[in-house]
């Protein structure tokens, strides 16, 4: 009886140990996300930033962003000239060398209003590829960002 109880305790402790390691490996890594945030809003335009956030527990390095051509085309507005595309989509050409945990970085990301680079309320799936700074493991996340005023989820706010 005592031997059976001791054996069951050992098996249970081992299972708890394996589960702890599994969740630790899932959690102890960089976790990147992206969002479109309002830089400034007025009665003529809303200016946007694309913000990359590392909410994981380790730094990330060699961060690159990509987006499908069809996704981009369906979200573009009337003012999507070649010059504006070069300016507002430059984030998909660059690599972020390092982003520490609990940090973020941002870049300008177009506008809506009288000059529409983006269609308001459009959605863009952005793929984020990056490496763990410590373990050299590669990760890939896809985040759908929304082109909306991030200051008000309804689009109405007090001035």
Image (cartoon, rainbow, N blue to C red):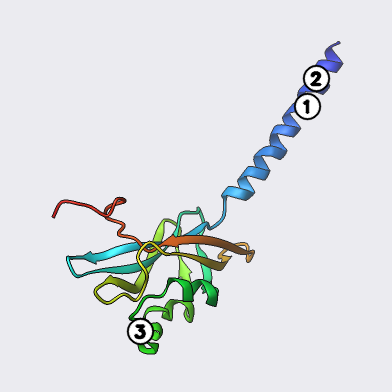
Q: Position of residue 28 (x, y in %)?
A: 57, 51
- SS state under label 1: helix
Residue 108 found in image quarter: bottom left
The answer to whether the residue labelled 2 contacts the one labelled 1, judged by CB atoms less than 8 Å apart, is yes
Q: Residues within 10 Å of mark 3 (few under 14, many from 20)?
A: some
- Asked whether residue 77 is in view, the answer is yes
> Which of disc 1 and disc 3 is earlier in sequence?
1
Mark 2 crowdedness (10 Å alpha carbons): few <14, some 14-19, many ≥20: few
Q: Is residue 34 visible?
A: no
- Name the residue beneath numbered marker 2: 6
In the figure, 101 relative to 18: above or below? below
The residue pinned by badge 1 equals 10
Left or right of 127? Residue 52 is: left
Badge 2 or badge 3: first in the primary sequence: 2
Q: Residue at x 55, y 62 (%)?
A: 142
Q: CB under 8 Å between callouts 2 and 3?
A: no
Place of residue 39 in the rendered image (x, y in percent of width and height, measured from the top left): 26, 66
Q: Quadrant of the N terminus?
A: top right
Q: CA distance from mark 2 to mark 1?
A: 6 Å
- Number of callouts in the render? 3
Q: Disc 3 designates what residue?
A: 84
Q: Nearer the viewer, residue 25 or 88?
A: 88
Q: CA distance from mark 2 to mark 3?
A: 70 Å
Q: Are marks 3 and 1 in contact (CB under 8 Å)?
A: no
Q: Nearer the viewer, mark 3 or mark 1?
A: 3
């Amino acid at each position: 009886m005592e031997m059976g109880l001791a054996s069951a305790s050992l098996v249970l402790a081992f299972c708890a140990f394996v589960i702890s390691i599994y969740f630790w490996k899932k959690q102890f890594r960089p976790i990147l996300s992206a969002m479109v945030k309002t830089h400034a809003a007025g009665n003529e335009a809303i200016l946007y930033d694309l913000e990359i956030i590392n909410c994981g527990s380790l730094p990330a390095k060699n961060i690159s962003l990509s987006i499908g051509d069809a996704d981009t085309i369906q979200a573009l507005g009337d003012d999507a000239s070649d010059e504006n595309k070069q300016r507002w989509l430059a984030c998909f050409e660059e690599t972020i060398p390092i982003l520490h945990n609990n940090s973020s970085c941002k870049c300008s990301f177009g506008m809506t209003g009288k000059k529409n680079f983006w269609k308001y309320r459009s959605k863009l799936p952005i793929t984020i590829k990056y490496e763990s700074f410590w373990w050299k493991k590669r990760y890939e996340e896809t985040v759908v960002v929304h082109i909306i005023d991030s200051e008000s989820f309804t689009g109405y706010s007090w001035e």
